Amino acid sequence: MKQYVAEFFGTFWLVLGGCGSAVLAAAFPDVGIGLMGVSFAFGLTVLTMAYAIGHISGCHLNPAVSIGLWAGGRFPANKLLFYIVAQVVGAIVAGGVLYLIASGKAGFDVIAGFASNGYGEHSPGGYSLNSALITEVVMTMMFLIIILGATDTRAPQGFAPIAIGLGLTLIGEFNSEVQF
């Protein structure tokens, strides 16, 4: 049970910190954190949670990571559904908290984007759906390679969260040009 609670809170932190930075801090003229800051926010949330809950649950924080670890033979199938449920619920609760915070601003309009991304006219660079899908598949694959390599027993111990957090930061910056 502790593993599922850890995944809930870890995913909650990822969504609140990452999406929260996009919604609340990215677009302020002259002082906003911008796209690079949002990428760092996502990377730092994973880095901090990997140290905080990695020893409890493995700090997957994402169904794609849990499925990838299962496919790689590093995670048991009997826990997969429970991890995914905990992650989805954590993300939904964080989205609700973020909505409560953001809606306190005068003129707030959820239709304006609320930490969403996309393709075509919703992509800063105007990238197509095909480009967005290729980016998502390749970046998820690279993230799983980083996770599997950094957490292997032959890798230097204690440094996996740094590699994983920085890997997500790089992926976030790449994605921000295509999808954010």
Image (cartoon, rainbow, N blue to C red):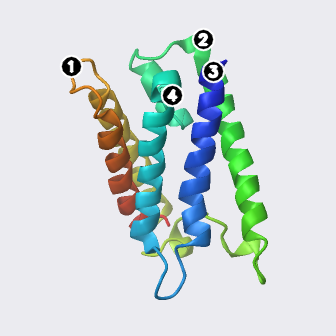
Q: Which numbered disc flags the more N-terminal residue, 2 or 3?
A: 3
Q: Which numbered disc flags the more N-terminal residue, 2 or 1?
A: 2
Q: Nearer the viewer, mark 1 or mark 4?
A: 1
Q: Amino acid at mark 3?
A: Lys
Q: Amino acid at mark 4?
A: Ser
- Please rate how many residues cluster around mark 1, counting C-alpha atoms within 10 Å: few if below 14, some from 14 to 19, many from 20: few
Q: Nearer the viewer, mark 2 or mark 3?
A: 3
Of the pair 6 and 96, the residue shown nearer to us: 6
| 62 left or right of 73 in image | right
Of the pair 54 and 69, the residue shown nearer to us: 54
Q: CA distance from mark 2 to mark 1?
A: 26 Å
Residue drawn at (50%, 67%), measured in percent from left and top? 180
The residue beneath circle 4 is 66
Contact between marks 2 and 3 (CB within 8 A): the answer is no
The residue beneath circle 3 is 2
Residue drawn at (37%, 62%), measured in percent from left and top? 173
Residue drawn at (59%, 32%), measured in percent from left and top? 7
Q: Nearer the viewer, mark 4 or mark 3?
A: 3
Contact between marks 1 and 3 (CB within 8 A): the answer is no
The x and y percentages for residue 104 are 78, 73
The x and y percentages for residue 106 are 78, 83
Q: Which numbered disc flags the more N-terminal residue, 4 or 3?
A: 3
The x and y percentages for residue 169 are 37, 54
Q: Which numbered disc flags the more N-terminal residue, 1 or 4?
A: 4
Of the pair 146 and 90, the residue shown nearer to us: 90
Q: Which numbered disc flags the more N-terminal residue, 4 or 2?
A: 4
Q: Which numbered disc flags the more N-terminal residue, 1 or 3?
A: 3
In the image, which disc is placed on residue 154?
1
Outermost residue toward the front?
52
In the image, which disc is placed on residue 78?
2
Q: Amino acid at mark 2?
A: Asn
The x and y percentages for residue 129 are 50, 60
